[in-house]
Image (cartoon, helix red, strand yellow):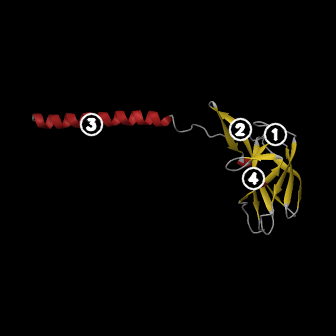
Amino acid sequence: MNKKGISVIIGYILLTAIVISLAAVIYTWMKNYVPKETLECPDEISIFIKDYKCSSQELNLTLKNNGKFNIAGYLIYATNSPQNQLATIDLSKNITSGGTPLNPTGIKMSGVENSFLPDSEESHLFDISSIQPRVYSIEIVPIRLQEQGRKEKLVTCINSKIKESLNC
């Protein structure tokens, strides 16, 4: 083999070593940015509609935390047709008393952080006058603030979702 052939082989070996080294560095760097575990709510999260009163103008919900953990708030969606299986109308911006709307969606219970204690009840009033012809059902999904690392993150408890048909 001549000197030129040896130089080409050494060049390929060096190039391969550099590419493998860069791949190892990039893999280690990216591994730190991918979450290791997803945040999930505890299984014992539960909320239910204890009572409701509604008219063509407003909806008054009395909610009860019948689970074992505190809740920060909830997402609330409505349907305006009995044929709709999936509630898509966000009612969180229509709240008039009892809670605080979250951005971009959701209702924060009164108090700080996860302040809706087990066996607690709260009433919330919603303006539903813009929903035509009327509200047929609502879906409520509890939310919690949970700590991941050193940050608090909002977690949607989708396994605890409830759906209620309304007679307004």
Which badge, 3 or 4, comes first in the chain's sequence?
Answer: 3
Q: Which mark sits nearer the N-terminus, 3 or 2? A: 3
Residue type at mark 2 is: Leu
> Which of pointers 4 and 2 lies earlier in the amino acid sequence?
4
Question: Dot 1 surroundings within 10 Å: few (below 14), some, or many (20 or more)?
Answer: many
How far apart marks 2 and 1 lie (CA) works out to 12 Å
User: As displayed, is residue 143 above or below residue 55?
Assistant: above
Label 2 packing within 10 angstroms: few (<14), some (14-19), many (20+): some
* Residue 116 marker: 1
Which is in the foreground here, disc 4 or disc 2? 4
N-terminal-most mark, 3 or 1: 3
Identity of the residue drawn at 76% across and 41% down:
72
> Could you tell me the amino acid type at mark 4?
Ser
**Separation of marks 3 and 4 at Cα, in angstroms:** 58 Å
Between discs 2 and 1, the one toward the N terminus:
1
Q: Amino acid at mark 1?
A: Phe
The number of callouts visible is 4
The residue identified by callout 4 is 92
Residue at point 21%, 35% (across, down):
11
